[in-house]
């Protein structure tokens, strides 16, 4: 009878280890997915900041800054 009890305990322990391993894999996958999302967000922010700086330097003013702009120059019409 003791052998049956020991075998049942070992089977239960093995099942618990398998469930624990599955949980660890799911947690690791979720962390990887979150890291990918964060990396995409950081990359997007860096590229947008760099492009905005390039455009500001090229145009000579910041986005939305009306100082120094000739308002009729964009339409090609004279005032």
Image (cartoon, helix red, strand yellow):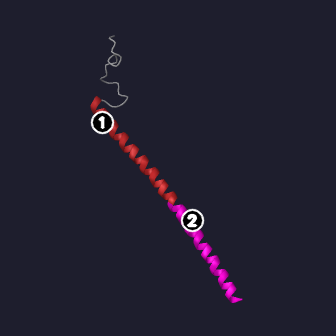
Residue furthest out toward the right: 1
**Secondary element type, mark 1:** helix
Residue 4 image point, x, y percent: 69, 85
Instruction: Tell me which segment is drawn in magenta.
Output: 1-28
Residue 15 to residue 3: above or below:
above
Q: Which mark lies nearer to you, 2 or 1?
A: 2
Q: In front here: 6 or 77?
A: 6
Residue 8 image point, x, y percent: 67, 81
7 in magenta:
yes
Quarter of the view holding residue 45:
top left
Residue 15 image point, x, y percent: 62, 73
How would you classify the magenta stretch by its main secondary structure? helix
Number of on-image labels: 2
Q: Which mark is residue 41?
A: none
Q: Residue at horizontal 35%, vertical 40%?
A: 49
Where the C terminus falls, by quadrant? top left
Where the N terminus falls, by quadrant? bottom right
Residue furthest out toward the top: 79
Q: Residue at horizontal 36%, vertical 42%?
A: 47
In the image, taking residue 62 as reference, residue 41 lies left or right, namely right
**Secondary element type, mark 2:** helix
Residue 54 to residue 38: above or below:
above
Q: Residue at horizontal 45%, vertical 54%?
A: 35
Q: Which residue is mark 2?
A: 23
Q: In front here: 11 or 24?
A: 11
Q: Which residue is mark 1?
A: 54
Q: In front here: 12 or 75?
A: 12
In the image, taking residue 7 as reference, residue 74 lies left or right, namely left
Residue 19 to residue 29: above or below:
below
Binning the other alpha carbons within 10 Å of mark 2 as few (below 14), some (14 to 19) or many (20 upward) gives few
Distance from disc 2 to disc 1, alpha carbons, whole Å, reads 47 Å
Residue 52 to residue 66: above or below:
below
């Amino acid at each position: 009878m003791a052998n049956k009890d020991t075998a049942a305990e070992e089977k239960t322990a093995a099942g618990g280890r398998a469930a624990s391993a599955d949980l660890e894999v799911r947690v690791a996958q979720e962390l990887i997915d979150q890291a990918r999302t964060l990396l995409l967000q950081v990359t997007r922010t860096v590229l947008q900041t760099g492009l905005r700086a390039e455009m500001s330097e090229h145009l000579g003013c910041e986005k939305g800054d009306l100082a120094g702009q000739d308002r009729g120059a964009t339409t090609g019409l004279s005032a």
